[in-house]
Image (spheres, rainbow, N blue to C red):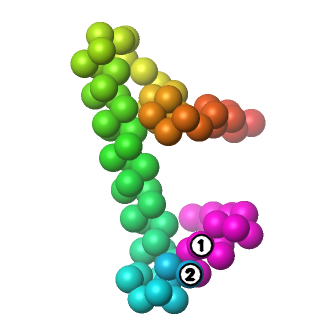
Amino acid sequence: MNVSLTPELEKLVNEKVRGGLYQTASEVVREALRLLKQRDDEARRADQRAGLAPADTRGAAARASGSPKPRARR
């Protein structure tokens, strides 16, 4: 898998590695994805507790973070 990052995100990843908490950029990305999944799961559970219909994960995450809904791939 190949992932393209914005210059700002690439800088953040490199800073995390230089900071010593992570040894590689891959570790930083894996941790970020784990946190994203956790946030999505929490938003989905909150929707369920509120009695909402099962939500698209991206929609639930966007509502939880205040982020716009991700664009669909073409």
Relative to 51, does residue 23 appear above or below in the rendering? below
Measured as percent of width and height from the top left, residue 15 is found at: 56, 81
Measured as percent of width and height from the top left, residue 29 is found at: 48, 66
Residue visible at 42% across and 74% down in the picture: 27
The label shown at residue 47 is: none
Where does label 2 land, which residue?
Answer: 15
- What amino acid is found at the position of numbered circle 2 in the picture? Glu
- Mark 2, secondary structure of its residue: helix
Relative to 43, does residue 15 appear above or below in the rendering? below
Q: Is residue 7 visible in the rendered structure shown here?
A: yes
- What amino acid is found at the position of numbered circle 1 in the picture? Leu
Q: Is residue 6 left or right of residue 2?
A: right
Instruction: For label 2, count other residues whose C-alpha is less than 10 Å away and answer few (under 14), some (14-19) or many (20+).
Output: some
Where does label 1 land, which residue?
Answer: 12
Q: Give the residues drawn in magenta, as a range.
A: 1-14
Residue visible at 31% across and 36% down in the picture: 42
Q: Is residue 58 visible in the rendered structure shown here?
A: no
Q: Nearer the viewer, residue 3 or 51?
A: 51
Residue visible at 47% across and 87% down in the picture: 19
Quarter of the image where one finds residue 2: bottom right
Labels 1 & 2 near each other (Cβ < 8 A): yes
Quick one: quadrant of the N terminus?
A: bottom right
Seen from this angle, which residue lies furthest left?
A: 49
- Mark 1, secondary structure of its residue: helix
